[in-house]
Amino acid sequence: MADNFRAVFGETKPAIAMVHLPALPGSPLYDEQGGMEAIIEAARADLSALQQAGFDAVMFGNENDRPYELVVDTASSAAMAHVVGVLKDELRIPFGVNVLWDPMATMAVAAATQAHFVREIFTGVYASDMGVWAPDAAKAIRYRNRLGRKDLAVLFNISAEFAASMDSRSLADRARSTVFSSLPDAVLVSGQITGEAARMEDLEAVKSVLPATPVLANTGVRHDTVEQTFAVADGCIVGSCLKVDGDTWNAVDPERAADFMDRTRAARAATS
């Protein structure tokens, strides 16, 4: 079920960069004084830097809506859709959305904004910072189809951040089972927390059992590890290392972003 992924990215191993939105209305860290205009301008600056650097795609996420919710406030979905809508004419590359940590809201925002792909935790049961985490892939994929978006590429993060799986199977076995049972377009392997790298042995194990499915590194890829990562993975999603001082909560540093893409192009050439 990788056709939607390949329709967006072709045979390229994509480097997908995060546009981390500042806290949205209704969340504790929301800047009431700056309001929506401050959120839009921060997202616009990051988007400009990432497109200038040559990234293959961007993904909008509400990373700073902490504490995270498993069923998000309606205001979060509405605000995200508004931000993407305002910036839509400035987008020159494919884009995705991820409304943490709510698959249904993610699908709704993707449909409203005409996104090309989504990322979420769709399968599994986890003990997490947010409590017991048990998403419903069947419900989410059916919702996507009811919204008229069968073409929407669905990226399944199979190793949840801020959580531990309650499933005793190995990560590779869970990945293989997920592809059989739940129809992902790509599988993502993560570290334990935003900005923390997935273990190379986990990437290798998952890719070894899913040779025909795109497998991407979802967190923690850095300038000095992109070549090693691309030797195994079919792409990456990157955020923190592109920021000023490598800090997740800072703005994108145009020089760091450009350097990362230079290294990505070299890594692709080395592994082609």
Image (cartoon, grey):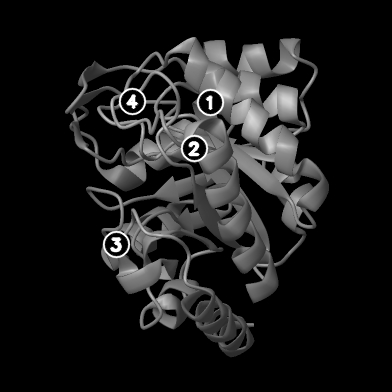
* Residue 134: image tag: none
Which-is-in-front pick, marks 1 and 3?
Answer: 3
Q: Position of residue 73 (x, y in %)?
A: 43, 13
Residue located farthest toward the front when viewing the structure as drawn: 33
Residue under the point 34% across and 53% down: 249
Dot 3, how many residues are within 10 Å of its Cα: few (below 14), some (14-19), or many (20+)? some
- Spatial CA distance of label 3 from label 2 is 17 Å
User: What amino acid is labelled 4 in the image?
Assistant: Gly
Q: CA distance from mark 3 to mark 4?
A: 21 Å
Position above or below: 143 against 252: above
Answer with left or right where residue 16 lies relative to residue 197.
Answer: right
Give the percent coordinates (x, y) of residue 122. 45, 26
Given the image, on which type of amino acid does mark 3 rest?
Ala
Asked if the residue under mark 2 is in contact with the one under mark 3, i.e. CB atoms within 8 Å, the reply is no
User: What's the mark number on residue 197?
Assistant: 3
- Rendered image: mark on residue 156: 2
Amino acid residing under circle 1? Ser
Image quadrant holding the N terminus, namely top right
